[in-house]
Image (cartoon, rainbow, N blue to C red):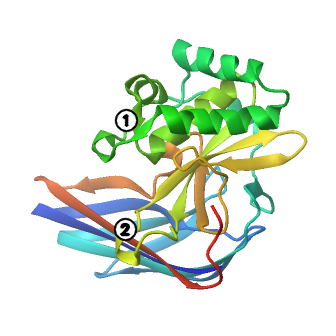
Amino acid sequence: MRLLIHHRTGYRFSEPQKRLVQLLRVTPLSCYGQNVADWQIDVDCDARLKSGRDGFGNEATMLYVDGPIEAIDVTVRGEVLTENRAGMVAGAIEPLPPQLYLRPSALTRPDEPITDFATTIAATQDSALSTLHALMGALHERIAFDPSSAEIGRGAGQAFAEERGVCQDHAHAMIAAARVLGHPARYVSGHIWRPDAPDEDQPATHAWAEVWLADYGWIAFDPANDHCPDDGYVRVAIGLDYRDAAPLSGARIGGGAERLTVAVRVERLDGPAPQR
């Protein structure tokens, strides 16, 4: 499938800022089943961009803007060719061993209810792979999608207890449950094209989980939609949790308040619609 992604982020400040520094993790890398044909980052003011890689192997771009600055728009646009690999991840840059992804983080630390949930499901399955599929389905049923519950600092335990959340919460809960069972697991940020939604109604950035099994390698699971990612997904960044893979993070020097707007559009340019 050929997907066009258009991602615009706008900042508006109530007072002129002296300096703005942002870390952008918005550029996908090619791997098996994902080929980045074209990608560019544009800024509507005089800015310096410096590209590199972070510790997880993500493409990271530092954005520096000297003030005074009252507003800035960052536009990301590109084309990606995808193939359906049924969630199997290979050919990606892997600077870290899988075992590092057993490390708990603030947003993925399992509590007693998640631990009981994971071990109970594992006891009913006959393999690690079937257990992970069962966990994905059970989390999809338990955590209802609720956009009003989107909070950056919300951990897996809170979303699990409240039984509501967004895709980030589904991913964090899946990661926590997998690690309880001894499987390395990590957070993935990216984009999704939905065949049943008009382009203007496409969601913004999406999130899911990847879990390591010795017999298979990394496998992607999307509990928010209860299926393994296919050719409608574009994988952008990974980490222990959302904070490691957030599309934008940074700091500013200056007073006043800021207003952030994000608009993302994903279009299918050719190819058959995926079967889900």
Left or right: residue 189 compared with residue 184: left
Q: Residue 254 location in percent, x, y?
A: 17, 55
Q: Is residue 90 visible?
A: yes
In percent of the image, x 78 and y 68: which residue is there? 32
State which quadrant residue 23 falls in. Answer: bottom left
Q: Is residue 70 left or right of residue 93?
A: left
Asked if disc 1 and disc 2 are in contact, CB closer than 8 Å, the reply is no
125 over 111 or under it: above or below: below
167 w.r.t. 45: above or below? above
Query: Which label's residue is closer to the chain start, 1 or 2?
Result: 2
Q: Position of residue 17 (x, y in %)?
A: 17, 62
Which image quadrant for residue 11?
Answer: bottom left
Image position of 20 (left or right of 273): left
Quadrant where the N terminus lies? Answer: bottom right
Residue placed most toward the observer, 243 or 200: 200
**What amino acid type is highlighted by mark number 1?**
Gly
Local packing at callout 2 (Cα closer than 10 Å; few below 14, some 14-19, many 20+) is: some
Q: Which residue is mark 1?
A: 153
x, y (%) of residue 141?
51, 36
Q: Residues within 10 Å of mark 1 (few under 14, many from 20)?
A: few
Q: Position of residue 113 (x, y in %)?
A: 53, 15
Q: Which residue is mark 2?
A: 64
Quarter holding the C terminus? bottom right
Disc 2 is placed on an element classified as strand
Q: Residue at x 80, y 63 (%)?
A: 91
